[in-house]
Image (cartoon, rainbow, N blue to C red):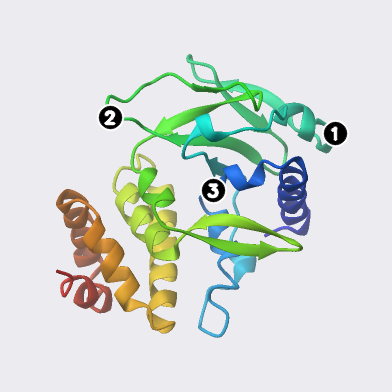
Amino acid sequence: MEKKQFELCIEILRRFNKAGILKDFILIGSWCVYFYKDYFSGVAYIDQATIKTRDIDFLINDPSRIRREVDIPALLKDLGFVTIMRGSKGYIKLDHPDLLLEFLVPEKSKGTDKPVALPKLGMNAVALRFLSFLSANTIKARVEDFYIILPHPANFALHKLIISQRRLKQDKAIKDRNAAIVILSALINKGESDAIREVFNSIPKKWQARVIKDLTRREDRELLAILETAE
C-alpha cells in the first residue's frame, strides 16, 4: 500500500469523524483487510503492505437514520476529489488519482437498478445484494483517537467467498477468494473457529452451498472440516 494512498484514506476518516457522520458508515471492501490488523494482533496475518486497492466503499445500512447534513463532495474537494457520474442511471462516485470513494446500501426485497438518494450527504448510493450480511455483525477498530465500524471478520470473509462466485472478472474473483482465506485462516489461528461456524449457520442454505462448493474446489480441507461440523 502506498503511503500517499494510506494517508489519504486516514484523512477521509478524520474528516468524517469530525463532521459527526463516521458513526453512520460501515467501512467494507478490501480496506477492511488492513484495518483488521489490530483484531489479529498476536497471530499470523498477511503483510498489509501487499494490499492495494483504489476503491474505498462505505455501507450505510439505514440512510433514514442519518441526522447530520454534510456535503461530502464539498468536504473532500480540497483533497483533490472530483464528482463523477457512472452508468446511465447516474451513480455518484468521488474520484481521486489514488482513491475512488463510493457509498452502498443493502438491496431491498424487490431490488432496484436506480441510485438511492442520500440528500443529506450530497451523494447517492448503489443498492447491492448480500450487504445486510455485513452489517448484521460488526466490530469497532481504533484509528488514531476515534473508531471505525467494520464487518466482523467472519462475516467479511464468508461474504467474499459468496460474491467471488458472482464476479465476471476472474482477477477480482481471485482477489476476493484470497482475502477470504487469509481472514478465515487468521480467525482459526486466533481460536475463533466457533465464530466462523456461527456465522456460517446464520446464512441461507443456498449461500452455504456456494461456500462449500468453492472450498471443495480449492481442496481447503481445514476450512471444510470446520464448516461441515456446523449445525
N-terminal of the pair, mark 2 or mark 3, is 3
User: What residue is shown with label 3?
Assistant: 26
Image quadrant of residue 140? bottom right
Task: Locate the N terminus by quadrant.
Answer: bottom right
Circles 1 and 2: CB atoms closer than 8 Å: no
Q: Quadrant of residue 73?
A: top right
- Residues at marks 1 and 2, CA–CA distance in whole angstroms: 39 Å
Q: Earlier in the sequence, mark 1 or mark 2?
A: 1
Residue depth check, mark 1 versus mark 3: number of the one nearer the observer: 3
Q: Residue at x 55, y 66 (%)?
A: 36
Depth order, front residue of 76/179: 76
From the viewer's perspective, tell me whether residue 126 is left or right of residue 177. Answer: right
Q: Is residue 136 above or below residue 131?
A: below
Q: In the rendered image of this protein, does residue 85 appear above or below residue 228?
A: above
Q: Which residue lies most toward the right here?
A: 78
Q: Secondary structure at mark 2?
A: loop
**Residue 16's x, y, as percent?**
71, 43
Left or right: 77, with 152 as reference point: right
Q: Which structural element holds mark 1?
A: helix
In the picture, the quarter occupied by the C terminus is: bottom left
Q: Viewed as shown, does residue 136 lie left or right of 73?
A: left
Task: Indicate the secondary structure of the residue bearing disc 3.
Answer: strand
Task: Compute the Cα span from label 1 to label 3.
Answer: 24 Å
Tell me if residue 120 can be seen. yes
Question: For the point 21% across and 53% down, which residue is it?
Answer: 210
> What's the residue type where badge 2 is placed?
Ser
Tell me the residue that label 1 is attached to: 78
Q: CA distance from mark 2 to mark 3?
A: 21 Å
Residue at figure coordinates x 58%, y 42% from the top left:
24
Q: Which residue is mark 2?
A: 109
